[in-house]
Each structure stands twice: as structure tokens, then as C-alpha cells.
Amino acid sequence: MSIKDYESVIGLEVHIELKTEHKLFCECATTFGAPPNTQVCPVCLAMPGALPAFNQQVAEFAILAGLATHCSIEPWSRFDRKNYFYPDLPKAYQVTQNDFPLCRQGYLDITTSEGVKRIRIARIHIEEDAGKLIHLEDEGTLVDCNRCGVPLIEIVSEPDMRNGEEAVAYLRKLRAMARYTGISDGKMNEGSLRCDVNLSVRKKGQEAMGTRVELKNLNSFNFIARAIDSEFKRQVALIEEGGTVVQETRRFDEKTGQTLAMRKKEEAADYRYFPDPDLVPLEVMGEEVERIRAGIPRLADERKAQYIHDYDLTDYEAERLTDDKELSDFFERAVVASTNPKTLVNMILADVAPLYTEDTVEDLLNPVSLGRLSDLMAEGLINSNTGRKVLKALMEEDFDPDLYIEEHDLAQINDREKLMASVERSIQANDRAVKDFLKGKESAMRSLIGGVMRETGGRANPILAEAMIREAIEAPEQP
């Protein structure tokens, strides 16, 4: 059989580190990058006799995440101990919510090349993070416990995704949710958003699931998509060769592009879950849920629908703008200064959006100035080449685009008489391009237009220049 006869069945377990001031059960700070073992206390180091004290802000953030993903909020939930032994876990157990999670049965709608698809969310529960191991070559391993007890939510999806594109689209939506609501910075490079992929394969049309393999330690959208593609191909090849897929945990090697076995996959029984005797159940009042619901800001989907309606943007344009909260905020500040939203959006997506990263927290340039610059382009007062030059200058320092263009003599030349001499010189200097064009080679026109642009210092209206060149070289010769 062909690989096209198979499909992936994918579910994601996404851990989001909550942006609280204190840890889950103590007053220790959660600052990323602090010197090792400087944000610890007897509680998060599991010293004898130390007892946890629940951080209420964690519950509020978890409820906020649940509401933003259309989950039902359980009025009663419970904390359990998940037992396992590892050097970065001083307690030898992790506090989590196993049998009774805080949030259940939500969903997110994603946009893919096939259209809109709904991804169901089985549950969202609260848990604490473990520490971090630092491996030193030929010296041993060090343990940093700063991360012990940092609050997380784990968002567990149903196995509704079928490929890497859908998985990445879903993850982007979750990251956008975290950043729009303010519950997390969602920085994958700092571990604020981490993802485990559960993947199996089956023949298309088959209802039964295949054997599930877990892919761990994936910390970028690119690696997640590549790992899914690689593991899908591995499992299909194994089945086609008559082999059996083993339930296990694997990691992705970004250098080879292959997944590698780590260990046999644990089952729930291996963790010996039981209710934590030091923590009372979490009870949530209905009025508290409504108070949190009332504070939910405009999320990505709401903004996307507004942009399509108010500014006549395409689904793709609106999706790109709202994928990152900071970029969306920038657009909203810029569009109030523009009367040509489409031109503004084109500039933002082509030249500004690529500069936004997970660490971007401030505007890269004055959005009002960019709004005015987009109007100058839309009105034909400057061309696109000049617009990019001015945009680059605006990223260095802010100024009035109108004054800058006037002072630097950058206004587009839209006068046929002023362009005529430049057009004639370009034609005379590019005889080969003229002959190629007359033979039907349309690409030769670029050389002729380029000659006019060089003659005018990039200020010529390229559309007018092309029209004048065509008129000049296609006109029948006079007897």
C-alpha cells in the first residue's frame, strides 16, 4: 500500500507556564533566568514538615484559560500526587489534577488549507512544574530547582488532528489565547509553552486507533511539524514491512530529522495517583466564574472577525495579524491613522510582521507614522520602493512622513512630461531588452523599467513608466 492510504491520528498535551508572581504552593518568585537555586524555599524543596499554601491567582488564570477555550468550569476539583522518581523532583511526586480536573470539554477552531476545523479539548488541569537538569560533559549533572513548583496548566486535546499543519495551527491558537488573556507569555524558547505529541497511524476509513507513540521535548513550531511528519513516515514504513508499532516515548533529533526511542511509555498505574492529603479540594463559586468571564479581553477570533468585516481583509490576512497579540495591537493603533487599511496591512505583513518575535514587547516603530506612510503609498504620492526606504528609516527614528518625503525630494513622479526623457534614455540604453520584448519576452520589460527607475532615483511611477515604454516601442514607425 502507499503512504497516501494512511492517516495520522494526533492529540496534543500542551503545558503552559502561568505568569504568576509566586509559585503554586509557596511565595517563591517565578522569574525566568534567575541564578540556579535562588528561587527556592522549604516548600518547593520538599523539606520535612513544609506544607503547601495554594496560590489563588493560579485558579483564576486556569479558569480564564478554560473560558477562553469554551470549556465548562467544574465547581469541584481535586489535587492528586503523581509519583515518580527523578533527580529534578525533590518531592518524588508531582502535584496535579488527575481524576477531577478544573476544566472540561472545550474546543478551539483552527484555520487550515482545507478550511476551518474544530479541535476538541478534553480537559485543562493545574499542576506544578519540576526542576531542570544541567548536563556538563565529562563532569556530571547539576540540578536547578528554581522551576520546582512553578504553576502550569496542561491542556489535553482529543485526537482530532491529522497532520503537522493542523497541530501547529492549534498550538498557535493556544499560544495566542495565553498571550491575549495575559496568563502566560507563551515563549517556547523559555519553556513557557511546551508540547507533547501523541501520534498513531491507521488506514484511511478505519475507525480503530493504532498504537500510540508519544513525542516529547518539542520546543518550536518547526520541530513539531517535522517530528510529526517523520514519525508518521516511520510508523507507516514499519507497518508496511510487517512490523509492530510499540507504545513508547520518543524524541526528535533536529539534526537528522528522525525520531529516536527514549523509554517505554508509562501507564497511569505506574504513577500510583492518589489524592494529595495536604491540599483541600478546589471549590469554585459561580459568581467567581462570571467575574472572570467578564474580564476576558477581545481574543484573536473576535478580532479576526472584526478585521474581515470592518477592513475587508481576507481570512489569511486577518489570521496573520491576530496570530500575535503584539502585532494585532500594533495594527489597531496604526489603522486609526490610515484611510487605506489594505495598503497598511500589506506593509505590515510584508515588512513589519517578520520582525516580531516571542520577545517583542514594544512597537518596532510608531504605528501612527506607518499609518500615514501607507496613505502616501495608496494615494500614489510615493511608490513602493520609496515606501520601503522610508519605512526602514522610521524603524531607526520617528518622524513625520510627509515632511521627510518633501525634505528628501522622494515624491513619486507621475507627470508624463517629466518622465519622457528618462523613458527615451532607458530604451536607447537597453536595445537588447527592446528586441527581446518585441519577440514576446515579457520579462525583458523589467530591465527597461529598471532603467527608468535608476534615471529617476527610484521616484518614477513604475506603472506609468511601463505604459510609456510600451507606447514608445510598440508604436508603428512613421513613414
Image (cartoon, rainbow, N blue to C red):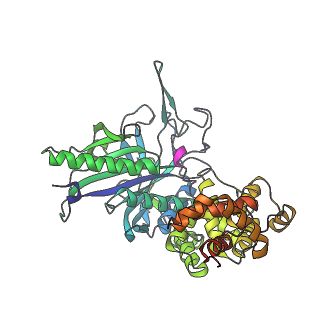
Q: In which quarter of the image is residue 164?
A: bottom left
> Relative to residue 202, is residue 51 drawn left or right?
right
Count of numbered circles on the image: 0
- The residue under the point 77% across, 52% down is 396
Residue 43, given in percent of the width and then of the height, sits at 53, 39
Q: Quadrant of the N terminus?
A: bottom left
Q: Nearer the viewer, residue 203 or 291?
A: 203
- Kindly identify the residue that appears in the image at 16 percent across and 45 percent down: 244
Quarter holding the C terminus is: bottom right
Q: Position of residue 172 (x, y in %)?
A: 48, 59
**Residue 150 x %, y %:** 53, 45
Q: Which residue lies furthest to the top in this view?
A: 138
Q: Is 122 in front, or is 178?
A: 178
71 sits left or right of 410 in the view: left
Quadrant in which residue 300 is drawn: bottom right
Residue at (20, 54) in percent of width and height: 210
Placement of 353 over or under 114, stated as above or below: above
In front: 7, or 372? Answer: 372
**Compared to 243, does 69 lie above or below?**
below
Q: What stretch is highlighted in magenta?
A: 181-192
Q: Which residue lies furthest to the left in this view?
A: 242
- The stretch drawn in magenta includes residue 41: no
